[in-house]
Image (tube, grey):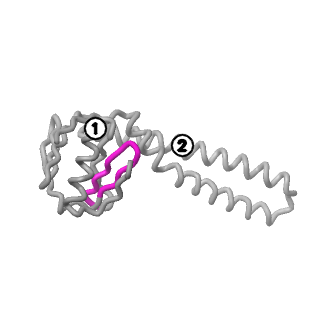
Amino acid sequence: MTVKTHITFKDFLNFNIKNSFPRIIIFSLIILAIFGLNFSNTEYNTKEIFKSASIWFAVVFVFIIIRSYFRLKNAFYSNKKIQEEIIYIFTDEKVQTKGETFDGDFTWNTVHRVKETKDWFLIYQSKTTMNMIPKKYFSPSEIIELRNIIEKNNVKAKLRND
């Protein structure tokens, strides 16, 4: 099975926002709790503490969002390979990848794990390195075929059932 893909900055940004949002909220709430504890030890009343904590929460949240956007923009535009059209050829034995400036392949038994989300197939080469493959380039039958190939090769995988 052959699938041609092209990841845009918008795709990359949306993927990272969806995957980072829980961490951003948790981090912001931790910062909020720290500020709340610091203010509770002072002479401020509850209304002032809540107002101050809310302002700090908003500032920290906005800072994290802006910082994340520019970090992701830099990561995307500094990686020329991710910006290329990439052709994936999936067989029972291996995955071949062909871009404008690279060509490679790997066997299924070297894959660390596969994670399928609503919009992506993520094929992890290690705990932190992955091939991001947008599902919008697959037909419904190709999605089923890829799931079957993954299962047939006993790859550790978290696949969807839809």
Q: Is residue 107 left or right of residue 119?
A: left
Assign the magenta stretch its main secondary structure. Answer: strand
Q: How many marks?
A: 2
Element at label 2: helix
User: Does residue 100 sit above or below 157 in this rendering?
Assistant: above
The residues tagged by marks 2 and 1 sit, at their Cα atoms, a distance apart of 31 Å
Between 5 and 50, the one nearer to me in the picture:
5
Element at label 1: loop
Label 2–label 1 contact, CB within 8 A: no
- Percent coordinates x, y for residue 48 in the rendering: 83, 52
Q: Name the residue located 35 percent from the left edge and 51 percent from the top edge.
A: 116
Mark 2 lies on residue? 65
The magenta stretch spans residue 18: no
- Percent coordinates x, y for residue 140 in the rendering: 30, 39
Q: Amino acid at mark 2?
A: Ile
- Percent coordinates x, y for residue 152 in the rendering: 20, 59
Instruction: Give the residues in magenta.
Output: 114-126
Instruction: Specify the farthest residue to the bottom.
Output: 41
Mark 1 lies on residue? 138
Q: Is residue 34 left or right of residue 151?
A: right
Q: Name the residue located 52 percent from the left edge and 49 percent from the top edge.
A: 21
Q: Name the residue located 38 percent from the left edge and 47 percent from the top edge.
A: 162
Between 12 and 31, the one nearer to me in the picture:
12
Mark 2 vs mark 1: give the one in front: 1
Q: Is residue 116 left or right of residue 41?
A: left
- Percent coordinates x, y for residue 134 in the rendering: 32, 40
Q: Amino acid at mark 1?
A: Phe
Quarter of the image with the N terminus in it: top left
The magenta stretch spans residue 125: yes
- The numbered disc on residue 148 is none
**Is disc 1 surrounded by few (<14), some (14 to 19) or many (20+) residues within 10 Å?**
some
**Is disc 2 surrounded by few (<14), some (14 to 19) or many (20+) residues within 10 Å?**
some
